[in-house]
């Protein structure tokens, strides 16, 4: 960790240089204003202790400069009783806190050690998160490429444009970029630009002065100011009006905003991540989106594929959403009916991850006895499933009861061929008799149901339980396969 300590008291700086003992730190010290600017221009700094008189150099706000040059930097102001108002002003501009002088080297080391520990914990947490993200986003070549790019661009201040179908996980990916950035300790503010009435967009984003519009009874802080020191996620950025696009472009160029009704500019340390399901290049050709704004936003472009193109991730997402919602709805979900599992993995998800999440929550609410059944899923999911018999492991960890350890893999049982010339019967021996020929899956399913009917002696409730399907599903199957419920074929 690189630490800057700047104070006009030369003896204080000498004491620090002589006695500083905190391990794994690189110390930069300065006791005059002339040496300070070259120091901060040439080095990347993680933590700074700066005396109030040094906070303004060459008519420049040092706090704002350091925050822009070193995203995630922690700044502590050194002050005394005479200049503590200057420390308060610095905090309003983004400094973390102040330390009243006289301050000992031990106090500085103690503060630095806390920040150092926080950064180490953050690194460990991010390493653990990266392993989870590989599973949640999808272990496909395309998604691995996206994640590799995310890990590279996250520590920078560059703007990012995320495109993809509605519900494909654009906000989730934006949050990943934020959490892997140096500003992860700051706010992550998400706003859907298309959900704000057009006449209120500017005041919501940039704030407004009291009386600047009808109903404005107090000064209003905008979402840009709320995101100061962190990340602002602008979803559906293609919905912004031409006037708002101009203001957004101005911020990206100068890092300054003006509240509606004000002339004073406010400097903000905000990283912008934008997202859209629109084709912005087409919008540029149509004149509804500014070309210069597009290129400002498009420093890095992440194109998220739809869920149907990364189906291997669906079982992991199912487990994730079960864990997310089972406690919310007071349900101890420990099993997933095979037919329900098959339906969930085969559905096309036109609404992408958001639709999958809603489907899982829907199923959890309707589930009984800790089991998600096929009939607990929405009709459109049931209709798309072929509803065959599959094996599935239990989802609940019996030791912790909190994590779902087993994978939800859809594995279709290998059919055991039967001599083609011999007519099917309810006899179990005939069902398992070996043959060199391969029968169709439909014929295999019909013989399996006939065998199950024989074993259950026509008991429909027992039959449905053993097959893992509902009575309505059983009825559709026997009708389609021309099976009489007395165990004979039609």
Image (cartoon, rainbow, N blue to C red):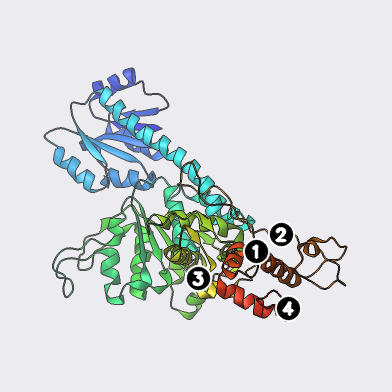
Tell me which numbered mark, 1 or 4, is placed earlier along the sequence. 1
**Helix, strand or loop at mark 1:** loop
Provide residue 230's location: percent of width, then percent of height: 35, 51
Tell me which numbered mark, 2 or 1, is placed earlier along the sequence. 1
For label 2, the crowd category at 10 Å Cα-Cα, with few meaning under 14, some 14 to 19 and many 20 or more, is few
Q: Nearer the viewer, residue 259 or 349?
A: 349
Provide residue 417's location: percent of width, then percent of height: 81, 64
Spatial CA distance of label 2 from label 1 is 8 Å
Tell me: residue 394, above or below residue 415.
above
* Quarter assignment of residue 89: top left
User: CB atoms at circles 4 and 2 under 8 Å apart?
Assistant: no
Q: Nearer the viewer, residue 184 or 443?
A: 443
Spatial CA distance of label 4 from label 3 is 41 Å
Q: Nearer the viewer, residue 148 or 240?
A: 148
Tell me which numbered mark, 4 or 3, is placed earlier along the sequence. 3
For label 1, the crowd category at 10 Å Cα-Cα, with few meaning under 14, some 14 to 19 and many 20 or more, is some
**Helix, strand or loop at mark 2:** loop
- Residue 465 in view (yes/no): yes
For label 1, the residue is 389
Q: Nearer the viewer, residue 378 or 125?
A: 378
- Image check: 456 left or right of 218? right
For label 4, the residue is 489
For label 3, the residue is 351
Select label 4 or label 3 by which is in front: 4
User: CB atoms at circles 2 and 1 under 8 Å apart?
Assistant: yes
* Quarter assignment of residue 476: bottom right
For label 2, the residue is 413
- Image check: 437 left or right of 195? right
Tell me which numbered mark, 4 or 2, is placed earlier along the sequence. 2
Spatial CA distance of label 1 from label 4 is 20 Å
């Amino acid at each position: 960790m690189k630490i800057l300590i700047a104070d006009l008291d030369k003896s204080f700086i000498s004491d620090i240089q002589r006695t500083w003992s905190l391990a794994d730190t690189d110390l930069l010290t300065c006791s005059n204003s002339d040496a300070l600017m070259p120091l901060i221009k040439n080095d990347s700094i993680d933590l700074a202790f700066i005396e109030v008189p040094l906070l303004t150099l060459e008519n420049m706000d040092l706090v704002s400069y350091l925050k822009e040059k070193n995203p995630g930097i922690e700044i502590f102001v050194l002050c005394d009783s005479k200049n503590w108002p200057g420390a308060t002003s610095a905090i309003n501009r983004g400094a973390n806190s102040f330390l009243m002088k006289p301050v000992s080297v031990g106090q500085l080391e103690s503060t630095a050690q806390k920040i150092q520990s926080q950064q180490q914990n953050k690194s460990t947490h991010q390493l653990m998160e990266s392993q989870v993200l590989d599973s949640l986003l999808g272990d496909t070549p395309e998604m691995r490429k996206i994640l590799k790019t995310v890990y590279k661009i996250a520590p920078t201040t560059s703007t990012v444009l995320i495109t993809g179908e509605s519900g494909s996980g654009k906000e989730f990916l934006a949050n990943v970029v934020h959490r892997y950035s140096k500003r992860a300790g700051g706010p992550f503010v998400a706003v859907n630009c298309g959900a704000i009435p057009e006449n209120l967009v500017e005041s919501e984003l940039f704030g407004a002065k009291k009386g600047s519009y009808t109903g404005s009874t107090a000064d209003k802080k905008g979402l840009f100011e709320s995101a100061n020191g962190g990340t602002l996620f602008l979803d559906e950025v293609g919905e912004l009006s031409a006037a708002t696009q101009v203001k957004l472009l101005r911020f990206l160029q100068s890092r300054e905003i003006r509240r509606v009704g004000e002339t004073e500019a406010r400097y903000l340390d905000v990283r912008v991540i934008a997202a859209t399901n629109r084709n912005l290049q087409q919008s540029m050709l149509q004149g509804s989106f500014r070309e210069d704004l597009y290129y400002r936003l498009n420093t890095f472009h992440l194109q998220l594929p739809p869920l149907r193109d990364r189906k291997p991730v669906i079982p992991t997402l199912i487990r994730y959403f079960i864990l997310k919602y089972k406690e919310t709805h007071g349900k101890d979900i420990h099993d997933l009916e095979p037919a329900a599992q098959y339906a969930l993995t085969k559905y096309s998800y036109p609404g992408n991850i958001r639709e999958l999440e809603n489907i899982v929550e829907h199923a959890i609410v309707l589930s009984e006895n800790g089991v998600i059944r096929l009939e607990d899923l929405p009709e459109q999911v049931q209709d798309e499933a072929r509803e065959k018999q599959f094996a599935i492991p239990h989802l609940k960890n019996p030791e912790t009861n909190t994590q779902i350890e087993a994978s939800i893999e859809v594995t279709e049982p290998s059919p055991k061929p039967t001599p083609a010339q011999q007519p099917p019967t309810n006899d179990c021996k005939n069902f398992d008799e070996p043959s060199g020929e391969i029968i169709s899956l439909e014929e295999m399913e019909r013989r399996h149901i006939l065998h199950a009917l024989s074993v259950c002696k026509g008991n429909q409730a027992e039959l449905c339980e053993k097959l893992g399907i509902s009575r309505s599903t059983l009825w559709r199957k026997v009708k389609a396969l021309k099976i009489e419920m007395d165990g004979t074929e039609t």
